[in-house]
Image (cartoon, helix red, strand yellow):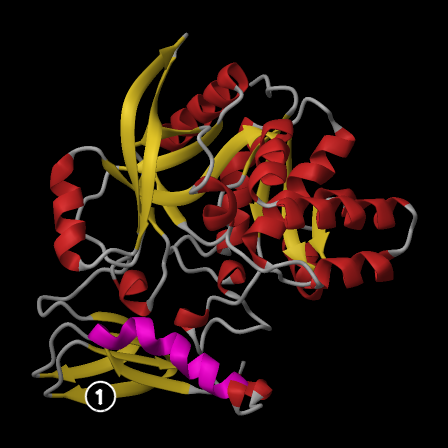
Amino acid sequence: MTRPRHFYAVIPAGGAGSRLWPRSRRSSPKHVLPLSGSGKPLLVEAYERIAPLTAETLILTEASQLSLLSGLLPGLESDGFIVEPAARGTTNAIGLAALTLLERDPEALMISPAADHVIKGAAAYRAAVRTARQVAAATGELVAIGLRPSYPATGFGYIDAGTEMRGLGWTARRVDGFTEKPPLRVATRYVASGHHYWNLNMFCFRCDAFAEQLREHGRDHYDGLVRVLRARREGDEGKAAAIYSGLPCDAVDYTVMERTKRLLMVPAQFEWTDVGSWTDLAELLPADQEGNHVEGDAVLIDTTGAYVSVPGKLVALIGVQDLIVVDTPAALLVCPKERAQDVKKVVQSLSRDGRSQYL
């Protein structure tokens, strides 16, 4: 297979995935865990999925995770990592990656697939990536990959897709707007509309086009990142880190994608989950006749809809419904499925109380 010149994948791999605590923690963040059933860490799956489609695939991570991720991808050279001095939001992360690539290759195109999602349907994935690259190269516009919703999810963002555009071998739609995590009533309407898509936060663009839009809509970010790269060229990583830590901390959706008039969407047809909660992870596992999902050894009596992940010991549940039970050597989590999104509040509480040994 001939790899397209000037086309780079940059996989953002930072954070800890607080809604999958206590399995996902600073020492073992979500993207290094084997959660899809393949036995491979999610980051390795993401790398292997995208690498054959690009000229080069790089990992974007924060300094504190560099050693951990280098061990997962031993064949990746040091210049295959773009390192944030610290986590400062996706605007700075994606901006740092785009400007770094521009220094290396003025014709660079970039795509940013997530490190911690589960994707099935390899052919459909490849088709979506190739189309996004074609559209970005041909139009100079920023491109989002969207997925037609299969149910009214309230935990995802939605793209409102407008006018259709066609080119040589590709179709895209102009993005008319974003809605972040709508209530059920609105999400139900979006599913029925036929022109709303889940926002996968997977963007493709010419790096010079993104830099132009960042300069227009997030000037503080752009100016700061230019200074960061100047300090790095001068060999002053301390100065680069100091500048970076002072940048505003915003999501790229808010800073650029929701404000630009130069955003198109390419519809995709692969299967996708962001594994954003224990209930999402449960759905990846086979269920018994009562809808229970079990990893490990369990005795379940008059129990329905439970998710049990307790390696190394027997668990008995009696007369409970829709319960999550997750055990690790350091911590045990028990909560109803309807409160799965609130697991992040445990992490916030531990952080607030200074109990870092559990984070």
Could you tell me the amino acid type at mark 1?
Ala
**Residue 32 location, x and y as percent?**
54, 60
Asked if residue 328 can be seen in this view, the reply is: no
Q: Quadrant of the N terminus?
A: top right
Relative depth, front residue between 290 and 156: 156
**Which quarter of the picture shows residue 207?**
top right
Vertical side of 104 occupied by 40: above or below: below
In the displayed orientation, state which residue is furthest to the right. Answer: 234
Residue at point 15%, 72% (across, down) = 305
Q: Find out whether residue 349 is within the magenta segment.
A: yes
In terms of secondary structure, where does tag 1 sit? strand
Vertical side of 7 occupied by 233: above or below: below
Asked if residue 266 can be seen in this view, the reply is: yes
**Residue 263 location, x and y as percent?**
43, 30
Residue at point 35%, 32% (across, down) = 175
Residue at point 72%, 58% (across, down) = 244
Label 1 belongs to which residue? 316
**Residue 119 location, x and y as percent?**
37, 44
Q: Which residues are magenta?
A: 337-351
Q: Main secondary structure of the magenta part?
A: helix
